[in-house]
Structures are given as structure tokens and as C-alpha cells.
Amino acid sequence: MFFGKTTRPVFILGCQRSGTTICQNVFLKSADCDVYREGNKKAMTDEWRLRDTATIRRLIRKSRKRVALFKPLNDAQWARRFLDGYEHARIVWIYRDPGDTANSAIAKWDSVQADIINTVGKALAQAGDAAGAARLLADRPGYAMYAEGIPAGAVERVIGWSREGLDAPSGAGALWWLRNQFYQSLDLNRDARVLLVKYEPFVTEPSAAVRRICAHMGIGYDDRLVADVHSGSVGRRPPPSMSASVAAACEELFASLDADWNGSLESGGGEAVAR
């Protein structure tokens, strides 16, 4: 028998290029998990977004594993819906150094993230709020999703950045900030159903990190899970030069996430590791 006679849904969330794929792939090796990756058409739309609740519930009911694992990064703004809409749900939120994240994003997408921030900011300025901006961008779903759910306190910051006309490094940093701020603005840092994971210790000390994740998910740990995890991507290149306002926002949020992460280790009996 599983949790409440059903498989537990677990959602891996965070910002793109933050190690969420590595974390997901660890559990492909677990006999306790059904893993629905971003490209899985049963669970995800063509925009790599989670399908409707009824569809996801059917997948969970059909599973014979202890955990059904999903990675709907483009829906991280709706994390509360996942926690409240699925019985026994858990979230694993992964964050990574903003400089390394930005470097990885630029290498993959060049200036696309800057264009997203600049475009979303202009829509926010025109509409006045996140819901209105998403409606204005409805014909560009790959952009509209980044307008969804932005809290009032973040709207003016994104508008200001769009008026700066961000370049690729600053845009990648701004998107890192926008996606990771949801961890705190949605009060996920106050919810025991959410586990915060820092990328750098995850890849340098994978056994300890994955043990914590397994415990959070309610499954057993096996050393084979971490056999392919390596730390070669940490600090590979110097951090990119971002605008002063983006750099300051990223530094402040990164320090705050580190404080939350260290606090979670201390409360769980682990050893806090300085950044």
C-alpha cells in the first residue's frame, strides 16, 4: 500500500539551467519512481507545461510506484496549486549560483531570456498587473507563461529592467531572480512539503543531498542513484557581467535562499554548509 492508497506526486521546480534535469535523471534509476520528463507527452504539453489536473491524476492513479515525479519548470509559479491540488504532494525546489545559471542559459539560448524579460516588462507596464500582461501576450505562449503569477512586489522591478533594455547576461540574471523569487513570495519556505536543494552541494556531495530528497519523497536511497552525478559544471567560467540592479537583486535573493537552505539543514539535523 502506498500513501493513502495512492502514489505520491512530487514536482521538481526552480529556474531553468539550475540542475533540475540532473535531479530528475537520478530518479530514473529508482524502482520506486515513475518519472515524467518535460518531453513526456502524457504529462506535458508542447510548451513543456503540465497537463490538466484530471490527466495528471489519472497518471498518478495508474502508477504502481511509490512516487510519480514531474518536472514542470514552466509552471513553477503555480506551485501552490500542486501542493493543494494533489493528495500527499511534495515539491523539490532546486536553486543554483546565479552566475553559473546565467552562463549556462546564455550558452543554450543566447539572448532569449533578455528578450523575455524586456517583453514581459513592457506588457506589465501596459497592463498594470501579471494577469493582464499574460493576456496581452496570449499569442506568444512561450513569453506569456513568464508573466503569470508575478506578485505585485516584483512587477515594478521587472518593468524597470525592461526599461533598461537588458543584454543577454542581465536578462539571464533577471530571469533567475524572477523564477526563484516564487520560492519565497509563495511562502514555500514556510511549508514542510517543500524541500529546498542547493545545486552545488547536490553535485559535489550527491549522496547526502539525494538521501535528503529520498526522505522527503518517502522512498529508499541507493548509492546507484548518484553514480553519474558529477561537479564539472560548478564555477566552470567566471560569472557574466550583469547590470548593477540585476546583480544586486540576484545577490540579495541568493543570500536569502542560502539562509533558507542552511536553516532547513539545521532543522533536519544536517550540517549547514556555507556558500
Image (cartoon, rainbow, N blue to C red):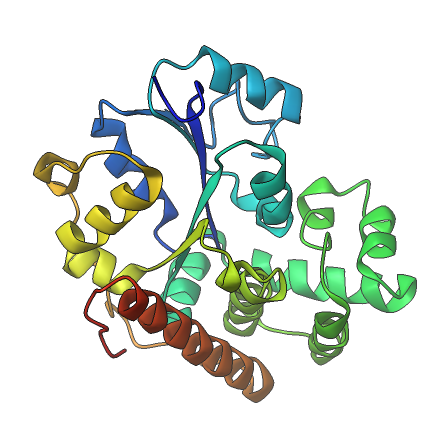
Q: Residue at x 42, y 80 (%)?
A: 255
Image quarter of residue 3: top left
Q: In the picture shown, does residue 99 fall above or below 8?
A: below
Q: Nearer the viewer, residue 216 or 39?
A: 216
Q: In the picture shown, does residue 239 fall above or below 70?
A: below
Q: In the picture shown, does residue 185 fall above or below 28?
A: below
Q: Nearer the viewer, residue 90 or 127?
A: 90
Image quarter of residue 163: bottom right
Q: Residue 247, position in %: x, y?
A: 51, 82
Q: Residue at x 33, y 45 (%)?
A: 216
Q: Is residue 197 left or right of residue 125?
A: left
Q: In the picture shown, does residue 90 fall above or below 146?
A: above
Q: Is residue 133 left or right of residue 237?
A: right
Q: Residue 232, position in %: x, y?
A: 17, 58
Q: Residue 73, position in %: x, y?
A: 52, 45
Q: Residue at x 46, y 82 (%)?
A: 251
Q: Nearer the viewer, residue 272 or 171?
A: 272
Image quarter of residue 119: bottom right
Q: Quadrant of the N terminus?
A: top left
